[in-house]
Image (spheres, rainbow, N blue to C red):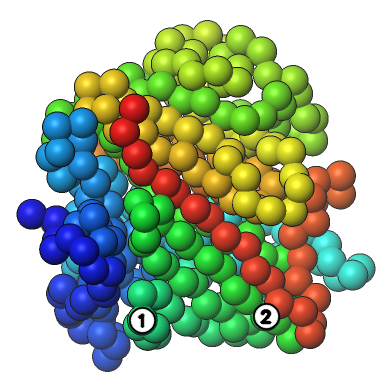
Amino acid sequence: MCGKSGINSITKEERLCCNGKDVILFRITDKSGAYAEVTNYGATLVSVCVPDKDGNMENIVLNYPNISEYLTDTCYLGSTIGRFANRIANAQFKLNGKTYGLDKNDGENSNHSGYSGFHQKIFEAEIREDVLALRTHSPDGEGGFPGNMEVEIHFSFQNNILTIKYIAQSDTETVFNPTCHAYFNLSSGRKKSVLQHELKINSAEYLETDNNFLPTGKIMPVAGAFDFTQYRSIGEMATKKQDVLKGFNTCFPIPDNGKPRPMASVKELTSGRAMTVSSDMPGILLYTGDYLCGNHAPFDGLCLEAQFYPDAPNQKHFPECTIKPGTQYEHIILISFNLI
């Protein structure tokens, strides 16, 4: 049973103490009875419970049975990624003539903000009617990034749309590129690989990468394995690839009009579920969970991460991802759930 229908609500479901702070699991219930669960540890999306074509309510987000297990997670399961999602080459970038060195946690590169990322922070939480507001402070120099930052992440779930809004300010010019690293599997309890899902991405281009998943700087026209301009089986497309990865870890630029627009849609025929990710950010990264481990195996879930481009601070022709003092960063991700 996913929840009582007819009313939007946010409730506290579970609590534990970590380093003197409360880690809380919140349930955000839609009027339909569907719900999303979020914990303030890492501003993490723990579950999304929505119906299949037969009306069965099931969770479609990879998670752990207990929120305590998130404290030792290494796969960024459902985490908010920040300050910078994905990779930065050589774990450094230059801003206003100064070079900033970052944590090297991916060979010589930085990935998902190194060892001090948002995925390990315990956020302050406040329920504001039908919005869960999570707040954190990121001090100047954390993970090597400049600027004292105040960050808020708002979660809401209404009309079968999960909304995630990022709000940030900094006292020094800095880079910022947050995203939601949730792994989805629309088949839920049927235990089907996401390689059997069908995917459409609203882009005619993708970012070429090297064997370390760093952009080469080239923006390529989609062709062969990367052409998701129509619904196509992820597994069938993956067989056309000729690189180091069986699945995908690929960023697709999405034509930008400054407003949220549909970026990618995925559907799973057996369950009848479909999902669309929309955002006002400039790209979306498809990751098929090739390196999932522990409780989950490769291809158990897929990520569709609306974000700025990987390594954007070092690629001057990529969309700028800086925040200037006195300005407020605001971007949004909308994840809508429906039936085929």
Q: Residue furthest bottom?
A: 20
Q: Residue furthest front?
A: 6
Q: Is residue 3 left or right of residue 266?
A: left
SS state under label 1: loop
Could you tell me if residue 108 is visible in this image?
A: no
> How many dots with numbers?
2
Report, in whole angstroms, how far the alpha carbon at label 2 lies from the one at label 1: 24 Å
Q: Quadrant of the C terminus?
A: top left
At x 29%, y 21%, the residue is 269
Badge 2 local density, few (<14 within 10 Å), some, or many (20+)? many
Question: Residue 199: where, in percent of width, then height?
Answer: 46, 25
Mark 2 against mark 1, which lies toward the viewer?
A: 1
Name above or below for residue 279 compared with residue 165.
Answer: above
Q: Which mark is residue 85?
A: none
Name above or below for residue 251 compared with residue 74.
Answer: above
Name above or below for residue 327 compared with residue 315.
Answer: below
Q: Which residue is at the front of the view, 176 or 256?
A: 256
Badge 1 local density, few (<14 within 10 Å), some, or many (20+)? few
At x 80%, y 76%, the residue is 324
At x 43%, y 78%, the residue is 133
User: The residue under label 2 is which amino acid type?
Assistant: Gln
SS state under label 2: strand
Residue of label 1: 129
User: The residue under label 1 is which amino acid type?
Assistant: Glu
Question: Residue 69: where, in percent of width, then height?
Answer: 21, 62
Q: Name the quadrant containing residue 178.
A: bottom right
Q: Which residue is at the front of the view, 200 or 184?
A: 200
Q: Which mark is residue 169?
A: 2
Question: Residue 128: where, in percent of width, then height?
Answer: 39, 83
